[in-house]
Image (spheres, helix red, strand yellow):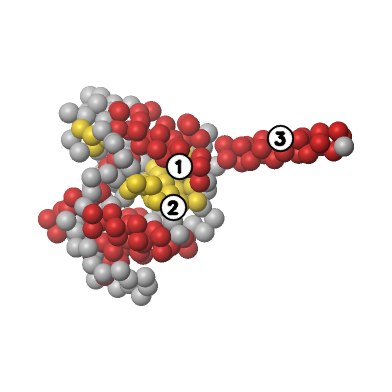
Amino acid sequence: MKHRALLILLLSLFATTLSAARRDSLRVTIFGDSYSTFEGYLTPDTNEVWYFAPPRQQPGNDVSRVEQTWWWQVKENMGWKVDRVNAYSGSTVCFTGYNRADYTARSFVTRLPNLGEPDVILVCAATNDSWAGAPIGEYKYGDWTARDLYSFRPAMAKLCYGLNTQYPNAKVLFILNSELKESINESVRTICRHYGIHLLELKDVDKQKGHPSVAGMKAIAQQVTEYVKKNF
């Protein structure tokens, strides 16, 4: 009996070690907007940046090093390798941007195919749809037309569908910013639930000029790390 108990213990320790090793070798892609940008770290490098290192650092925001970004802290906390950071300042999920401009080229739906070969995808989206006052639209879960995608709900559904079908082996977490319109929040909850996509709603994120400060980045990183450790 003692030998059997020892064998079970050793197998359990081996399984735990193997699981940790697998987790530590995962590749993560960051799919985001301005909150996830930092100069010199974007793919493609033509994406617009909001966070810069000195001397071009954003006035009024204290984030000045890539190590201070939320995603850098998460990958360090988890021991992950970054596959790519496809973040674009001002990007919307749908095709409608600020002042009703056509944001098709920078939208999350358009950028979806360019996420590499990740094991984990962290999506930080919907902030600009809320801020820009994009049309909310109706829930629609298939047969999308180009016209549909100028509204948030159909575009959000197409995005989640695409995440599941184009990256079937990746674990996906949708990170929802705090202080957004409730119509956006409820839409994200409903659509993520429909597609079985993990959702984390951020709380208590300190911001300067509408963007996470050093303290805010740390708060995001802590919340994301806690979620993925518990659920992934």
Q: Which mark is residue 13?
A: 3
**Horizontal side of residue 18 vs 9, given as left or right:** left
36 or 13: nearer the eye?
13
- Position of residue 44 measured from the top left corner of the image (x, y, whole percent): 36, 46
Residue type at tag 3: Leu
Distance from the alpha carbon under mark 1 to that under mark 3: 24 Å
Would you name the residue on which mark 1 appears? 227
For mark 1, give the secondary structure: helix
> Are the residues at dot 1 and dot 2 in contact (C-beta closer than 8 Å)?
yes
**Horizontal side of residue 225 vs 154, given as left or right:** right
Asked if residue 172 is positioned above or below residue 226 in the image, the reply reads: below
- Tell which circle, 3 or 2, labels the residue nearer the N-terminal end: 3
- Position of residue 25 measured from the top left corner of the image (x, y, whole percent): 58, 39
For mark 2, give the secondary structure: strand
Residue type at tag 1: Tyr
- Tell which circle, 1 or 3, labels the residue nearer the N-terminal end: 3
> Are the residues at dot 1 and dot 3 in contact (C-beta closer than 8 Å)?
no
Query: Is residue 20 visible to us here?
Result: yes
Residue at the image point whose x is 50% and y is 46% from the top:
231
Query: Is residue 53 visible to us here?
Result: no
The residue lying furthest to the front in this view is 1
Would you name the residue on which mark 2 appears? 198
Asked if residue 19 is positioned above or below residue 116 in the image, the reply reads: above
Q: Callout 3: 10 Å neighbours few (<14), some, many (20+)?
A: few
Q: Callout 2: 10 Å neighbours few (<14), some, many (20+)?
A: some
> Are the residues at dot 3 and dot 2 in contact (C-beta closer than 8 Å)?
no
